[in-house]
Image (cartoon, rainbow, N blue to C red):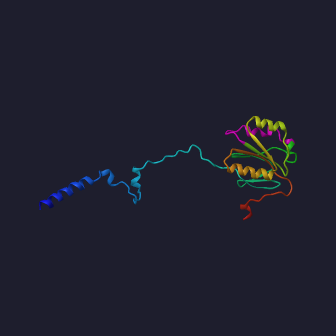
């Protein structure tokens, strides 16, 4: 009997040694599912957005000989696209190479944040711009890509999709050239 009593007291002492402090009793185990009360165990992450990206990116839906459809808005005649704005561009569409001057590009270098590249669509074929216009843009740190309007529209959409700060100066192609977007083709 003395042996049984000694074993019993030894067992009680050992079980008290195995008891974990109160703070560890409710710690999550491997199979434990977290509840809202368990948030105190983990640090929370706080994120502050200084500027939302992709606020309203410009996208050229379609074009024809009269103008462009941009973000669902119809624009007649030549237009200038800025990162978050759309403007009529005052150039003569049948003489683009002669009418595009340093002054007609001035709106692209006045903006903040600075535009990285301006895509110029010169109608149904690529036309060379005056060298002083290209030199003035290069001096201000703006790249110029001159293409025919169908390719300029595709390039502009691609660059905007990449998140680049892009502008476009577009002249509608004359004649029967047109692009219908997928969204309009299904309607």
The quadrant the C terminus occupies is: bottom right
Residue at the far top in the pictured view: 139
Q: Is residue 91 magenta?
A: no
The image shows residue 32 at horizontal and vertical percentages of 39, 59
Which quadrant of the figure has residue 166? top right
In percent of the image, x 30 and y 51: which residue is there?
22
5 or 62, nearer to the observer: 5
For the view shown, which residue lies furthest in the left direction? 1
Say which quadrant the N terminus sits in.
bottom left
Q: Which residues are drawn in magenta? A: 98-116
Q: Residue at x 83, y 52 (%)?
A: 173
Q: Quadrant of residue 49?
A: top right
Question: Along the line of sight, which residue is nearer the eye, 187 or 180?
Answer: 180
Left or right position of 34 against 17: right
- Residue 102 appears in the picture as rendered: no
Question: Vertically, is 139 above or below 175?
Answer: above
Q: Is residue 64 left or right of residue 20?
A: right
In the rendered image, residue 110 lying in the magenta stretch gets the answer yes
**Percent of width and height locating residue 47:** 52, 46
Can you say whether 51 is above or below 35 in the image? above
Front residue of 158 and 63? 158
On the image, the x and y values in percent for residue 23 come to 32, 50
Residue extending farthest front? 3
Q: Is residue 182 visible?
A: yes
- Please indicate whether residue 133 sits to the left or right of residue 16 in the image: right
């Amino acid at each position: 009997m003395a042996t049984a009593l000694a074993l019993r007291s030894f067992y009680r002492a050992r079980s008290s040694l195995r008891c974990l402090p109160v703070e560890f009793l409710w710690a999550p185990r491997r199979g434990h599912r977290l509840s809202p009360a368990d948030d105190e165990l983990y640090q929370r992450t706080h994120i502050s957005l200084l500027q939302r990206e992709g606020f309203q990116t410009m996208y050229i839906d379609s074009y024809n000989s009269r103008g462009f459809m941009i973000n669902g808005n119809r624009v007649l005649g030549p237009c200038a696209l800025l990162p978050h704005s759309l403007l009529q561009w005052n150039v003569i569409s049948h003489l683009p190479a002669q009418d595009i001057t340093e002054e007609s590009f001035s709106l692209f270098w006045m903006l903040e944040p600075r535009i990285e590249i301006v895509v110029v669509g010169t109608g149904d074929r690529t036309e060379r711009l005056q060298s002083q216009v290209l030199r003035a843009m290069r001096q201000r740190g703006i790249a110029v890509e001159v293409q025919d309007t169908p390719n300029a529209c595709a390039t502009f959409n691609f660059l905007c999709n990449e998140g680049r700060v892009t502008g476009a100066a577009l002249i509608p192609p004359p004649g029967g050239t047109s692009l219908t977007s997928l969204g309009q083709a299904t309607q």
